[in-house]
Structures are given as structure tokens and as C-alpha cells.
Amino acid sequence: MRPPLVALICCVPLIGEGIRPELEFAEVHSFKGERDTAGLLRSLEPDLVIVDSSADAREASAYAIERDSAVLHISVRSRTLRLFQRGAWKQVGAAGAATPEAVRNVVAGTLFARGATG
């Protein structure tokens, strides 16, 4: 079984660099943010999307509804994590605790719950 595919779409490159090593259980492809995110996601068809901008979060959530997948939005300003799943956003983890390890935990929990990992 193939590893889950995660699209990491970041406007702040350091966010992607900090998260990528924590996702060793997935195939991760990184992209610069706010550049036709919807088109990219429809072409790539990832199991989960991670974004760091509100604009990309909006586009990715529309994709997630179409494909029954999930989006993790990392807010750089508030250092919070929001997960879009089954048509709704919810904050995950403690406020101000958007660490690479917290991202790993949310991503792994979401993917394993969906059965996307082997």
C-alpha cells in the first residue's frame, strides 16, 4: 500500500521546512502558497492538505469537500491549528501550540482514522 500523499502549501517557507521532517510516514510534496491552489490539488489529489494562509485554506477546503479529504490550516499569527474535515472547521490542539510535533500528531491521527496509511 502506498504511503498517504500530503500537499504542504506554504507562503512561509520555514513552516514547511519545520514540518516536513515530522511527516516521515507520508509522501510529502511542498509548494509555494497562493498560486492556484484549487487547480494544484485537483491535479495532485492528495489525501491531506496543509496550508499556512487563509486564502489557501478556503481553496483547499472546497477541494476537501469534493474529495472527502482533510485540510490542516496552520495560523502563523495565532500559532493555532484548524482542521477542516467533513465540511466543518474545528480548532485542534491547545491555542498557541502549533508546533511541528502537534502538526504531526494531527496529520497522523487524521490519516490513520481515514485508513490512508498502510
Image (tube, helix red, strand yellow):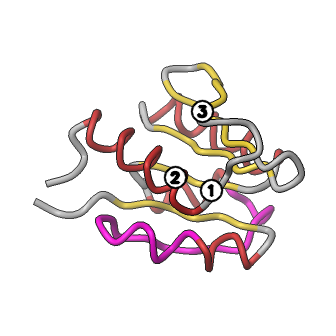
Residue at mark 3: 92
Gap between marks 2 and 1 measured at Cα: 5 Å
Residue lying at 60% horizontally and 33% vertically, measured from the top left: 92
Image marks 2 and 1: residues in contact by CB distance under 8 Å? yes
Left or right of residue 106: residue 50: right
Q: Please tell me in which quadrant of the rendered image residue 87 appears.
A: top right
Q: Residue furthest right?
A: 77
Around disc 1, counting alpha carbons within 10 Å, would you say few (fewer than 14), some (14 to 19), or many (20 or more)?
Answer: few
Left or right of residue 98: residue 69: left
Residue 79 lies in the magenta-colored region: no
Residue at mark 2: 42
Q: Position of residue 58 (x, y in %)?
A: 75, 39
Residue lying at 44% horizontally and 60% vertically, measured from the top left: 6
The amino acid type found where label 1 is placed reads Gly
- The numbered mark, 2 or 3, whose residue comes first in the sequence reads 2
Residue lying at 21% horizontally and 39% vertically, measured from the top left: 115
Residue lying at 52% horizontally and 52% vertically, measured from the top left: 42
Circle 1 or circle 3, nearest the eye? 3
Query: Regarding mark 1 in the picture, which secondary structure is present there?
Result: helix
What residue span does the magenta drawing correspond to?
A: 19-37
Quadrant of the image containing the N terminus: bottom left
Q: Position of residue 70 (x, y in %)?
A: 49, 38
Gap between marks 1 and 3 measured at Cα: 27 Å
Gap between marks 2 and 3 measured at Cα: 26 Å
Residue at mark 1: 39
